[in-house]
Amino acid sequence: MPVLMNKDLLQFHLQGQNVSYIFHVMENGQLGQLYFGKKLRDRADFSHLSKRETRVASSYIEEDPSFSLDLIKQEYPGYGTSDYREPAFQIQQPDGSRISNFTYRSFELVKGKPELPSLPATYVEKEDEAETLLIHLEDAYTNLALTLMYTVYHNRDVIVRSSSFKNNGDLTHEIKRAHSASVDFPDADYEMLQLSGSWSRERHLHERRLTPGVQSIQSTRGTSSSQHNPFLALKRPETTEHSGEIYGFSLVYSGNFSAQVEVDHYHTSRVTMGINPFDFSWKLKGGEHFQTPEVVMAYSHNGINELSRTYHELYRSRLSRGVWRDAERPVLLNNWEATYFDFDEEKLLNIARKAKETGVELFVLDDGWFGKRNDDKTSLGDWFVDSAKLPNGLPTLVRQINDLGMMFGLWFEPEMISKESELYRRHPEWVIQVPGRSHSIGRHQLILDFTNSEVVDYIYERMAGLLTESNIEYVKWDMNRYMTEVGSLQLHSDQQAEVPHRYILGVYDLYERLIATFPHVLFESCASGGARFDPGMLYYAPQGWTSDDTDAIERLSIQYGTSMVYPLSSMGAHVSAVPNHQVKRITTLETRGNVAYFGAFGYELDVTKMSDNELNQMKHQIDWYKENRTLLQYGTFFRLLSPFQNGGNETSWMVVSKDQKKAIVGYYQVLAEPNPGFKRLLLHGLDKEQEYCVSGYKETFFGDELMSAGLQLSSGYDGSQTGGLEESGDYSSHVFVLTGVDQGRGDKS
Ligand code: DGJ
């Protein structure tokens, strides 16, 4: 029973595999936090975990000076009585008051996990995987109801939380803030981890020591953004990848979010996470209901890597859906960096033919196939094939690609519209806009008003038409600008601050309808690379384009950071040409492959311009990847050396099969070192009793040796002027395959 409770004292104990989360109904009827952390044995009464104290200069209820909310850990705090910290919610009432008092009414315990209406969410396949506790509260004065939902999975270390408001009265109220969850920690001795960056350098890992005040990350851009991912973690200063305590908070949402930690004057820490309250409000009319997205809170006392594995396993098996969830992802070739907008049928077919020879399984036609799109200034919204480029039409091209023995994939940017388009000429009112204000432009384009179901219906019809008339088995769903002049012509003036959330609901609606109608299609999400790489998207698209930056060395930081939360099967990773188009760096084809293997692998270059030698190498890479892809996409992932530590010159990571009989290790060096010290890689996740062959080594090693003594790396440096660059020079890399001796050798070369 993962939800234990004392019905008399109204205490609730959620017990995951190694985690406990305990709260209760306080003397004022509101919910108080008692504990979140390493699993505790259950007992009848936990109320001693929250001691009341009287402090000078606090506000309290008249009858009891020790009852000051400012001094008490709470579950879903409001502002306006005696707590001065950041609240989880705020509701403005018709009389102008912003004070609410939600007190306990009842609880409900359900098997499994209910779906969240219109929102992406983690799920169960069997009812006995999890239990969900619903706590119903009510503010009698306003007739508003609040339900807090908690799911605990039996065999995982996660607690999933969300909240919903219901207006049981007749008057309209305005929700000014509705976070998904709030957690009060009793101290502030933590470091906050966050994944931040920008276009082409997304999700770099940043750490900071908590200090008094609010430390926060957010998006105001209309998508989760490449600036900050909707994730934060609190770890103890001594916590490492493989030891120590860490708490993760990951929001299953793709729009404007806020995630913050407030350290108060008593050195306690309050984490709040949810839809960004900045520039947000929501009118809740009588009878209406508002559901927040969910936060997945994870816990580990065995370090950062275990926390990541908890997220990987949950997100790849109980957030991603559909036939592609567990299927091997095809090796793809995308024509974007090969041709950009400059292609015709013949050029595409030439690329596809060569790609087929190397073993590519899926040919993806990127931007530029529709309207008159010869550059990025025009035609978004005109989802009709450009007959100047493809005079025989899309079905013919798709057939020819299929005849070569490859699947066909197509790029869309469904949410966008170019000013220079037929659609804009017909429907200028379908654009996100504020009357009387000029439009700011991003990549020459405007955003369609996805709060308007007529717009979503139209785009659905166009996409569904194209997906029906040709055998399209993959869709790359792109999104290339952030929101400005946020407003909708079809919403009332007092609902304009609802636009960003309603927009994302429109995006989810379109995704849901498309995957329901075309369940066989593999969707890959994309937003100028990784500007919307979040758990919300994973519910619809099991893989995402990790970054527009395809440089192997930059990708080390991006993929390493992304792996904090997201599984390898979700990370699109391509080998591209050199000099690299984003940073002009030249790396070997081997290193580009060695980095991209750890993801949903593909190529993004003009194969018709490659030498026979390179094509051979590419074929070899694809053969090897196919042999190992189940392990690479679905194995257990361990980070070994961080590009964010020790100067970042070395990165290493590995995947291990479920039965621990096979593992693949990637090791990467940025700059060569003269006469370097001896290096040993300490591996993880192996069976200590298992004897392994390691590719490139004559000896065999037992798992315990590899994990405790390590794998000694050959420096490849003997001071002579000979020896290949690949071996030990700048941007060199190695992939080692470990195979249980009873399994036969799995050498890479
Ligand atoms: C941005 C994407 O991230 C790229 O991969 C490519 O699809 C371009 N858009 C096309 O415009």
Image (cartoon, rainbow, N blue to C red):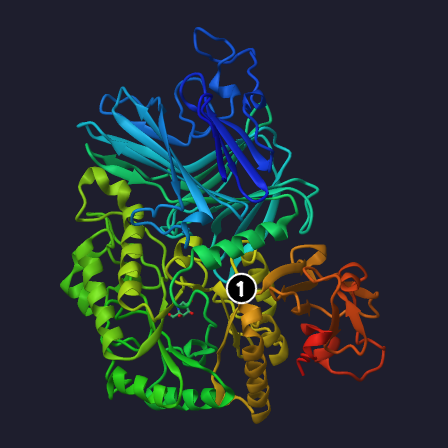
For this rendering, which residue is in front, 576 or 282? Answer: 282
Residue 548, image x, y percentages: 47, 67
Ligand 1 - quadrant of the structure image:
bottom left
User: x%, y% of residue 402?
Assistant: 35, 86
- The amino acid marked with disc number 1 is Leu
Q: Between residues 123 and 396, which one lies in front from this camera angle?
A: 123
Query: Is 666 displayed left or right of 20 in the figure?
Result: right
Relative to 374, is 302 on the left or the right? right
Quarter of the image holding residue 263? top right
Above or below — where is 392 with respect to 119?
below
The local secondary structure at tag 1 comes to helix
Disc 1 residue lies near ligand 1 with CB under 8 A: no
In the rendering, at what x and y percent does residue 155 appear? Answer: 53, 48
Query: On screen, 713 above or below 17?
Result: below
Quadrant for the C terminus in the image: bottom right
> Image check: 739 left or right of 396?
right
Instruction: Judge from the rendering whether residue 616 lies leftward or rightward of residue 668; answer left or right.
Output: left
Q: Is residue 388 visible?
A: no
Q: Tell me if I can see residue 430 in this picture.
A: yes
Residue that carries the numbered disc 1 in the rendered image: 568
